[in-house]
Amino acid sequence: MFTHMKIASERMIFVYFGDEIHEQTHENIRLALQILADKPIKGITEILPGYTNICIHFDPLQIKKNTEEQQHMTSADIVMAFVQQRLAQSGATKRTSTRIVEIPVVYGGEHGPDLAYVAQKNGLTPEEVIDIHTAGDYLVYMLGFAPGFPFLGGLDKRLATPRRETPRLHIEAGSVGIAGEQTGVYPLATPGGWQIIGRTQLDLFLPHEQPPTLLRAGDRVKFIAVKEDAQ
């Protein structure tokens, strides 16, 4: 399932599942997350998915305390042995179902100041950009940059547009953007350099709920074009 592991520090290791962004790689990562969450060892504090790997954080003192029979090994070696043992059991684990989350978006105008630029850059009309963007089926590969920010794969190559040369100091929460061959949604008002084509009123960061994000790795996103008063 995985290709190799690497020690990043005395408190962190990386487990790699490939070297390029691909849906099958992501599926293997999701399966690994499910396996490692089942009967975890004490001392592993967090497991975070990336595009091609998972990052495992652990407390080295706790790891050593709970594995006294392996005191001759470093904490990182103990965690890697645990990961290798667990992932060898992958055939016995069922895959989780995929959620589909619809996100209503008001495109263009003050909500999407870069819509015209994305259209011009790709030889399209703004209406064609909206049609292509809403026709997509987007996979949430991971969350990062800001709490709840989804990095979405599946953007039609006809919409691929470089980041802005000069990032904005303020982008409104809910802004939907394009950067290269990715699309995503800003969950909070932050600086950023993505090309903004629209905005949603959905809250992606839910700090008082569990989990505290609307989206999770493995979800599928469908953007729905709406008028401003319909959100």
Image (tube, rainbow, N blue to C red):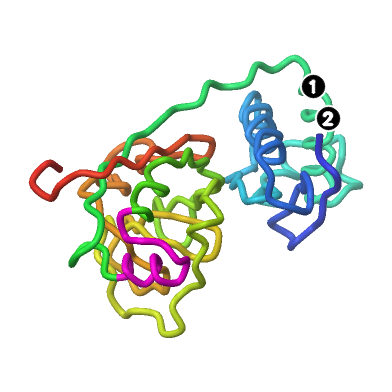
Task: Please state if 27 lies on the left or on the right of 144 as rendered.
Answer: right
Q: CA distance from mark 1 to mark 2?
A: 7 Å
Task: Please state if 48 lies on the left or on the right of 149 as rendered.
Answer: right
Q: Which residues are magenta?
A: 114-127
Camera-side residue of 179 and 212: 179
Disc number placed over residue 3 in the picture, else none: none
The percent coordinates of residue 58 (x first, y second) are: 65, 49
The picture quadrant where one finds residue 17 is top right
Q: Circles 1 and 2: CB distance less than 8 Å?
A: yes
From the image, which quarter does the C terminus lie in? top left
The percent coordinates of residue 110 (x first, y second) are: 18, 67
Camera-side residue of 189 and 55: 189
> Is 121 inside the magenta-drawn segment?
yes
Camera-side residue of 148 and 35: 148
Task: Kindly identify the residue that appears in the image at 30 percent across and 54 percent down.
Answer: 127
**Tag 1, which secondary structure?**
loop
Task: Kindly identify the residue that appears in the image at 38 percent across and 55 percent down.
Answer: 129
Task: Please state if 16 lies on the left or on the right of 107 as rendered.
Answer: right
Identify the residue under disc 1: 89
> Is 116 inside the magenta-drawn segment?
yes
Identify the residue under disc 2: 85
- The answer, for residue 103, to whether it is visible in the render is yes
